[in-house]
Structure formats: C-alpha cells, structure tokens
Image: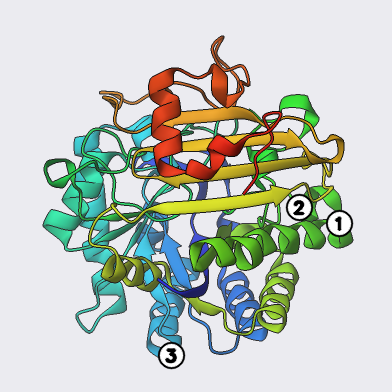
Amino acid sequence: MRGRFLTHVSIVRVNQIEVTPTRSIGEDEAIDNRPERIRSRRAAFAAGCPDGRMTWAISWLALQDNRKEYQEARRLLASYHDRYGDEITFIPGGYFAPMFDTREHNRKTIHDALGQVSQMVGGGYRPQCLIAGFMDAENQRLLAQDEGIHVCQGQIWSQHGIDNGDGDGGICYPYYPSREHYLKPAQGASDFIDCVCLDGWTCDFLAARRNGFEGGFNSRLGVGPIETVGNLGVVAGRREMMDTTAIHFDGGYAMNGFGWVTAIWETSIGHDEDLTYWLETVRERWPDTKVTTEGDFGLEWRKNNPNNEKLNYRFDEKGTGAPGSEKNLEIQWFMNEEFRLALLRDWTKDAPALAIDFTRYDLKAEEPQSPQREWSLMNVLNQKGIRPQDKPKRLGELSPDDQHRIFARYPQLKNLSRAEVTD
C-alpha cells in the first residue's frame, strides 16, 4: 500500500439520529437536508477537488420520505454517481445501530436499505461499502458474506464519553475484524472476517486520549468542522484541520508508506467553505493525494493485504497547540495485529515516556449481546484513564510477558534511556 488517500463522506438524513427505522432522537433536520444544501455540498467538494470522488450515505427515513424535497434529494444522489462516479450507500442507526437495536433487526434494515439504494441509483448499481459509525462484528461478517460488500466504516476511533455510543480500543487504520469483537483485528483464518473495517473521523491523537469533554476539551478534535472551525473559529480551526492532516501525510506517510485521512460531515451542518479550503490546501501541499470513495480506498487496501499479518502502523505527534493538544507533549502510537501501544512524554523537559495505552488483541474479547452504550475493548491499559488500572506506566512496570511482546515487535523500545523513547 503506497500513497496518500483522503476520503470524504456526506450524510443525507431526516432526523439527527435515526437510531432505528421507527425511532429517532435529536432534532428534525429536514430543512437542513433540502436539495439546495446537497447541491452546495457537492459544489464545495468539486471546488476543492475537481477530479475527486466522494461517498454519500443516506439514512432510512431519507430513503422512505415521499416529500418532493426528498424525492429530489434521491434523484440528485443518483445523478452524482452517474456524473462524478460518487459512491451512494446507506447509514443505519444514525451511527449508533448496535447501541439501540438488535443484530437481527439491524441486519434486516441493512439488507432492505441496500436494495433500495440499488434501485434508487439504477443500472445494477451496488455500493462497495457501508457507512455505519459503529457496527458489530457479526453484521460486518454478514455484510461480506450475504451482500458481497467487503468494506465497512464500522468504528469511530477513540470515541468514549461523547455522543450516544462508546467504542475505544481499536486501530485507526484499516484492518480485518475478529469474529469476537469488531475492534479486535482477526487473529487467524478461523477468526477472520473478510470486511475491511474503517475509521470514521481522523482525530488529533493528543486530544483523542481524553474521555469525552474531560478537562473542558473536545476529544474528537481533528479534521471535523464542528470541533475545529465551529468551536475555535476559522483561523485556528482550519489550522488544526491541516495540522491533523499533516500528522498522517508527513510523518505517518514516511513511517507507514501510506497516509489516510477521513471525515464524515453531515450535509445539515454546512461548513461547505471549510470543505473547499481543506481539499484545496491538501491538494496544494500534497498534490499526489488521491481523493476517492470509501469503497475504493478499502478495496485498494484489501488488494494489498489478504490478512492482518502485515499490520504495523506507527504515528508520532507533537502537540499542535490547539485546545487539548499540548505543544509540550509528544504521543507515539504503535498498532499491529497483536496489540496497540501508546507512549506519552513531555519532550520539552526530556521527560520519561509513559505508556498510556496497551491493548492486547490476543486475549479473549466479547461484544455486548444486547443493545447498550458501551462497546469498547479495554484490557491491560487504556488511554482514556477511566478505570483504576489505567494509570500511566513506564514500560518496565508492565508485566514481563507484556514487555516481551512489545520488544519482540519493536526492539528499538529496549533502548529506553530514562524511559525516553529513542528510535
């Protein structure tokens, strides 16, 4: 896998959070999803990246609504596929399907809605991915097995204590999920789900270590306009969007061989000018960036990775200076098939690095059996710090077995001097 990739998803819906086909929470947003808003979003995307392709996800109610505005909205989406090659797909549960409905009900809704999307677009069209926010492992398995769709935006990385669902513990770049838990990479052939699981929002790693709004900061700070431009203003907000992008397209690209940045923006929130700015600036700074659909990106990764054995993602961020991303701090992430590890240090004081997260994927994991808010995967040590055992530790304070696992993968971490990571 080589290159820089950017994927953008826009959501068209009726209610703010359509948690089941018959139940919604939040506000009615029909007025903010009218056809002119959809046209404005597509025009903003084209202004920022004329030859790019994007993904549209439509909700259950927006598929069913017979008002003229939604009839026109569906016609527009179909035309964007024909004209630009955009991907049109479905979003179940308003991002939170497993939190509010059973696996069986979600499965039926997904099947029925995908058929309606195919009919809406016509010409034998079939989307290559599902946009889900969160999606349990079994429904990702059935998505591949029964629907022939092998890409699912199925997790929101690091999310905990915010919005309507919690799901921390996974890998922020593509992986094949385990049949045990959607956040656990498959550990072998018997555990393997042939569906590439993708994150929904690229976040600032330092802000993302927080639980919800802990300390008055926003843990979802990154490339999303609500958390950046909406809260920080245009200048500081756009700077944070670009600084977060650079984490992946500069250092991350150098370490991993490819970089990927993604975001889901609801049509109802506006911020079209910020979308144009982001895309224009990305193309100016990294002109080789491929702006493509979720499905195409996921399938490109799948083509290069038949399993999880080659997973070895590394990220290194020094704080951007935005609220919650302290300039004096440096966070390093190591993510692979066996575990994820995060090290945090004050680089301005030559301070020792402390492990703030060590999540093992070889251990048994289990998803909730019925709808509930909490869908995280936490075991040895978790970055959110919400359990008594989640206190930052030096690597030498981890168990000998855990140290062996870490050093076998990353022998350079044996060279800690005063617990400072040296490469």
Q: N-terminal of the two: label 3 or label 1?
A: 3
Per the model, the C-alpha gap separating discs 1 and 2 is: 7 Å
Q: From the top left corner, tell me how far across and down residue 350 is, in percent.
A: 81, 36
Task: Judge the density around disc 2: few (<14), some (14-19), many (≥20) Cα neighbours within 10 Å.
Answer: many
Q: Is residue 262 left or right of residue 111?
A: right
From the image, tell me which residue sits under label 1: 236
User: Taking the image as drawn, is residue 43 in sight?
Assistant: yes
Give the SS element for disc 1: helix
Give the SS element for disc 2: loop
Residue at position x 63%, y 84% in the image: 287
Q: Is residue 189 left or right of residue 95?
A: left
From the image, tell me which residue sits under label 3: 83
Q: Is residue 49 left or right of residue 72?
A: right
Q: Is residue 221 above or below residue 388?
A: below
Give the SS element for disc 3: helix
Task: Judge the density around disc 1: few (<14), some (14-19), many (≥20) Cα neighbours within 10 Å.
Answer: some
**Mark 3: which amino acid?**
Arg
Residue at position x 62%, y 49% in the image: 423
Residue at position x 42%, y 52% in the image: 312
Nearer the camera: disc 3 or disc 2:
2
Q: Is residue 209 above or below residue 41?
A: above
Residue at position x 29%, y 45% in the image: 177
